[in-house]
Image (cartoon, rainbow, N blue to C red):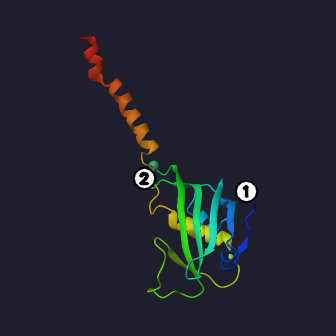
Amino acid sequence: MLETLPKWIHSQHLAVKGRNLKGQVAISELSERLCDNLCNTDGYVQIDWQFILDDKKRPTISGQVETQLQMLCQRCLIPVVITVNAKVALVVFTEEPSQYEELPPDYETITLPNKPVSLLTLIENELILALPVVAKHEICPSNEFQMQDEAIEQNDNPFSVLSKLK
Ligand SMILES: [Zn+2]
């Protein structure tokens, strides 16, 4: 059973308590920053995020964000389902960190004010980062139709009729 996710979170407080946030939000609840890139906002985004202090007592967020988004294929303009299964690994700073700040391996920084922030905006940021630069099918369905058309043409080829008459 997934617990209801809070709308606002205070990552510093959650990290001190070592809390875990696991649940889902409807894609349609996310803003146009994400939704304008989608051709359909059905479905849900699942998150499983652990908030914990690292060995330097800095708040961190780590876990997964998973969903399936429908975007328009830039090759054939037919919707393509993009499966997002992205790793989240962030060290939270309240001020822009110096570039010399040491981070755990594979972690990135995020600057958040020391007050509650919108969880939806955080989820949205992670999804936008995970979106492909250009959405496209591995094999466009329209290409399959073209191949079928070619197969039909070959059957109607007058020469194949001639060869039958021989
Ligand atoms: Zn396509």
Amino acid type, residue under disc 2 in the picture: Arg
Q: Residues within 10 Å of mark 2 (few under 14, many from 20)?
A: some
Left or right for 24, reference 150: right
Quarter of image, res 112: bottom right
Q: Residues within 10 Å of mark 1 (few under 14, many from 20)?
A: few
Residue 20: assigned label = none
- Give the mark nearer the N terminus: 1 vs 2: 1
Q: Are marks 1 and 2 in contact (CB under 8 Å)?
A: no
Q: Residue at x 54, y 57 (%)?
A: 84
Q: Which residue is mark 1?
A: 2
On the image, the x and y values in percent for residue 68 come to 58, 53
On the image, the x and y values in percent for residue 13 come to 70, 79
- Of all residues, the one furthest to the top in this rendering is 166
Left or right for 112, reference 150: right
Q: Residue at x 65, y 60 (%)?
A: 27
Secondary structure under tag 2 reads loop
Q: Nearer the viewer, residue 27 or 85?
A: 85
Q: Nearer the viewer, residue 162 or 14?
A: 14
Q: Residue at x 64, y 58 (%)?
A: 46
Gap in Å between the C-alphas at discs 1 and 2? 38 Å
When the figure is inspected, residue 155 is found, relative to residue 86, above or below; the finding is above
Quarter of image, res 126: bottom right
Asked if the residue at label 2 sits under 8 Å from ligand 1, the reply is yes
When the figure is inspected, residue 91 is found, relative to residue 47, above or below; the finding is below
Q: Residue at x 62, y 73 (%)?
A: 52
When the figure is inspected, residue 85 is found, relative to residue 13, above or below; the finding is above
Q: Nearer the viewer, residue 27 or 101?
A: 101
Residue 75: assigned label = 2
**Quarter of the figure with the C terminus:** top left
Amino acid type, residue under disc 1 in the picture: Leu
Asked if the residue at label 1 sits under 8 Å from ligand 1, the reply is no
